[in-house]
Image (cartoon, rainbow, N blue to C red):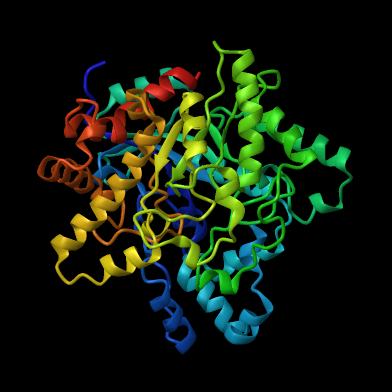
Amino acid sequence: MPKLNFYVDIHAHPCLRAIYCYDKKENRNLWDNVENKEFQSLIARYMRRQTMDIKKYSQSNFTKLSEGKVRVVFDNLYPVEKGWLNYRNLAKVFFGKKGGLEVFVGTTGIKTEEYRRLQKSKDYFKELIEQYDFLKAEQGKAPNKKNEYYIASNYKSLKEHIQKNDHRIVVIPCIEGAHSFGAGNPNAKKLSLEEHKILLSKNISDTKHWEHPPFYVTFAHHFWNQLCGHSKSLKPPTNIAFNQDIGLNTGITQLGWHVIKELLTNKNGRRILIDTKHMSAKARSEYYEFIHTYNSINPYEKIPIICSHAAVSTHANFISSAKEKDSIKKMGTGYHNRWSINMSNEEIRLIHDSEGLIGFILDKTVTGGISTIDRIQAMEDKNARKEAYLRLIWSNIFHIIKVSGDISAWDRISLGSDYDGLINSFEDYPDASYLPQLHKDMINFLKVTEFKKELWYNYDPSTLAYKIFTRNAMDFLEKHYK
């Protein structure tokens, strides 16, 4: 295939702001920039400063994606988890009722009316369908009449869309959080195990028969979903406000195994792959053992492991990764964040062996140790700061290559920005429109420094960047998006 002049982002959230952040529903679209409402109370202004690295505007609307040369985007649909709608008791007292609402709306951008509607909603699956229907209904020309987007349903349709119009963005639907099928919400908690299995089987089957079925599902997210344990993901000040304790670091439940098998089977429709980001280390270990056994028995029909928006921890294995409680101290002082949500060396090798795909996240606090991030942020010389961040990014990527120990590791890494996922963005690359600059800077950094050249495997810097930003994801889709 000839070289492609665009990028692929395997994890972003173009839909979220369009769904939840407009003042008027009739004005919703996926192209406009939507900014958070700014409140002037002391608590709202304080929290805005505390979360200043979380961008308060659209990072991945289709205008930004077009400007950033992203022509294939995995849009992760996400029904907002109930855990976001309930503050810890101490936070309730500190914020007060009005202050709590202002902090939530000011930080996330979700409008007050939507916040109140979500508090009353009892059905995640209904929310999921509404998001998909919106994405489907909005297909076509942008307001500028030049750009457009369409949803793919398989690799063949993806190629047709790409070839038809150079200004067309192609969307691949995905889902963040298997709670979306109806697990972990107020209605589901009233069901017996068997009733819950029946409900989830039906909802998964219905989803598989959409016109454009999801390509993957991020199995866990920030809060307990009755299916598996999640990793700690919230750092100060967010973890002071929201409680992740229920189900934290536990394994896969009986109901969870039922859902995994319903997603991966071809008997109820096309297989939906599982993205392991956010699963606890224990749950990931259990899932990888299951996949390893399956792939050993079925070497010509391997199920690939996806970790769609990830970084590395440098822990040797799952056990050492989870041994110490995730804390600010555990984040470490070097070029890697050592929390258990990040990939251990054992995990990297298992993903590689499954011929899977890793999406590199553009969240600085996920990629680096806390003192390293603080040191880089304090740099007054912007060029020095940029170079330090590029070293941080490449350090994570080269660790994946080193641990995998084979040239084929360069086929396993892609871009998974997590833009519009409330991430702590790199200052120099705050949204999707800056991806061409990131691409250029990553190439130039290697050319100038020859950083870790022994791990290039004779590829040149431009080829390495091309594989990460485009080629690897397209090859993965050609093999699995059928």
Considering the image in quadrants, where does the N terminus appear? top left
In the image, what residue occupies the spot 74% across and 48% down? 226
Specify the quadrant of the image occupied by residue 9: top left
Q: Viewer-proximal residue, 31 or 182?
A: 182
Left or right, 311 with respect to 271, comes to: left
> Front-most of 137 and 224?
224
Q: Indicate the position of residue 334 as horizontal and vertical percent values.
A: 35, 58
Percent coordinates x, y for residue 289 in the rendering: 64, 30
- Determine whether 13 is above or below 149 in the image: below
Residue lying at 56% horizontally and 27% vertically, measured from the top left: 211
Q: Is residue 295 visible?
A: yes
Residue, x 65% and y 19% (percent of image)? 266
* Up/down of 131 relative to 365, above or below: above
The picture places residue 161, in percent across and down from the top left corner, at 35, 25
Q: Nearer the viewer, residue 146 or 92?
A: 92
Number of labels in the image equals 0
Can you see residue 205? Answer: no
Kindly give the residue lying farthest to the left in the view shown.
448
Q: Quadrant of residue 270?
A: top right
Residue 233 placement, left or right of 397: right
The answer to whether residue 235 is above or below residue 366 is below
| Above or below: residue 313 compared with residue 213 | below
Which residue is situated farthest in the bottom direction here?
42
For this rendering, which residue is in front, 44 or 170?
Answer: 44
